[in-house]
């Protein structure tokens, strides 16, 4: 009897491990089936009208990519909670424009719809955020106005007026939704360091070589006050460099390729698409 009890206690962790593995595999299968179903459903007419009226970049996509984006939007809205702050009422307009801009980054990328967080907090306009830093025994709290931020393993925070501006103007190289969701792609490999998960193992070495070299160039330009198609904020850290170049890649692809061809090629491989032809399509 005692031997049976000891055997049972020793085998219990193994049984629990197999049970967890089975349940996890089943849950992933159910999730993917649901996603497939959502991706095949047509967008509601009111959602489509929002894209057509407020997001001109959507109209420049070829039909195939429009359909893929529509499917991603359906999944995104099913899996993410968009919550208003400071009295902002969340409408379909807000939900669809956030989803459309976020899903543009994963249009062709295999992935899991920004895992690791669920909530997106939206303020009516720029908001005040505080941060605390230590200086010896002192704890200093700083405040700043922000248009967006991405908390590591936590929610994304956005200012609605900047979300709307980013959707309406897809050629100025500034898009707060793309910027903050690029941070979420960056942290999928556990660290927010400017190195996202890449499509192939072979790309990592070349990515590191090109990105490190380009980042140093941007730091030098920033120090000398030299303008570049890449916003100078990208020179503040490798993580911000990746997020800022992402904005530039999608909104100023021709300029980015002309001034930084190797960098453009790396981002083209990372996102598995080429935005340049979109500007040549009918609006």
Image: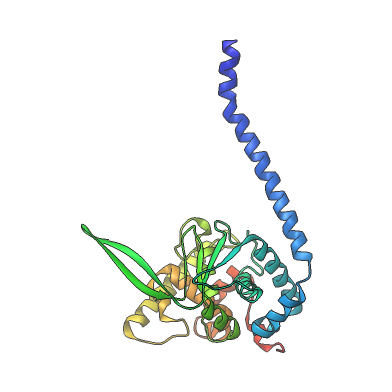
Residue at the spot 59% in from the left edge and 81% down from the top edge: 167
Specify whether residue 261 is in view.
no
Q: Position of residue 21 (x, y in %)?
A: 64, 40
Residue at the spot 77% in from the left edge and 76% down from the top edge: 45
Q: Position of residue 148 (x, y in %)?
A: 47, 72
Question: Is the C terminus in the top left, top right, bottom left or bottom right quadrant?
Answer: bottom right
- Residue 255 horizontal side relative to residue 107, left or right: left
Q: Position of residue 108 (x, y in %)?
A: 66, 68
Question: Is the N terminus in the top left, top right, bottom left or bottom right quadrant?
Answer: top right
Specify whether residue 153 is in view.
yes
- Residue 23 horizontal side relative to residue 139, left or right: right
From this viewpoint, which residue is outermost toward the front? 87
255 and 156: which one is in front?
156
Residue at the spot 60% in from the left edge and 61% down from the top edge: 200
Which quarter of the figure has residue 118? bottom right
82 and 149: which one is in front?
82
- Residue 223 horizontal side relative to residue 119, left or right: left
Eyeballing the image, is 176 above or below 121?
Answer: below
Q: Position of residue 117 (x, y in %)?
A: 55, 58
From this viewpoint, which residue is outermost toward the top? 1
């Amino acid at each position: 009897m005692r031997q049976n009890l000891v055997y049972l206690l020793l085998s219990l962790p193994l049984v629990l491990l197999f049970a967890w593995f089975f349940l996890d595999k089943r849950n992933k299968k159910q999730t993917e089936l649901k996603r497939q179903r959502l991706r095949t459903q047509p967008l509601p007419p009111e959602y489509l009208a929002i894209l057509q009226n407020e997001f001109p970049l959507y109209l420049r996509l070829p039909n195939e990519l429009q359909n893929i984006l529509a499917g991603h939007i359906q999944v995104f809205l099913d899996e993410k909670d968009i919550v208003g702050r400071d009295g902002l009422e969340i409408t379909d307009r807000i939900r669809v424009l956030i989803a459309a801009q976020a899903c543009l980054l994963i249009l062709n990328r295999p992935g899991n719809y920004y895992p690791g967080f669920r909530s997106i907090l939206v303020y009516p306009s720029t908001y005040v955020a505080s941060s605390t830093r230590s200086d010896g025994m002192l704890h200093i709290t700083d405040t700043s106005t922000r248009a967006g931020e991405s908390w590591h393993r936590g929610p994304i925070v956005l200012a609605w007026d900047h979300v709307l501006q980013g959707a309406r103007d897809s050629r100025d190289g500034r898009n707060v939704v793309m910027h903050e969701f690029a941070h979420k792609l960056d942290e999928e490999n556990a660290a927010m360091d400017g190195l996202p998960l890449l499509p192939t193992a072979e790309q990592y070495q070349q990515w590191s070589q090109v990105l490190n070299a380009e980042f140093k160039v941007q730091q030098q330009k920033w120090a000398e006050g030299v303008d570049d198609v890449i916003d100078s904020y990208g020179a503040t850290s490798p993580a911000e460099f990746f997020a800022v170049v992402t904005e530039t890649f999608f909104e100023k692809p021709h300029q980015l390729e002309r001034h930084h061809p190797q960098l453009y090629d790396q981002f083209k491989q990372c996102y598995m698409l080429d935005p340049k032809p979109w500007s040549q399509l009918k609006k």
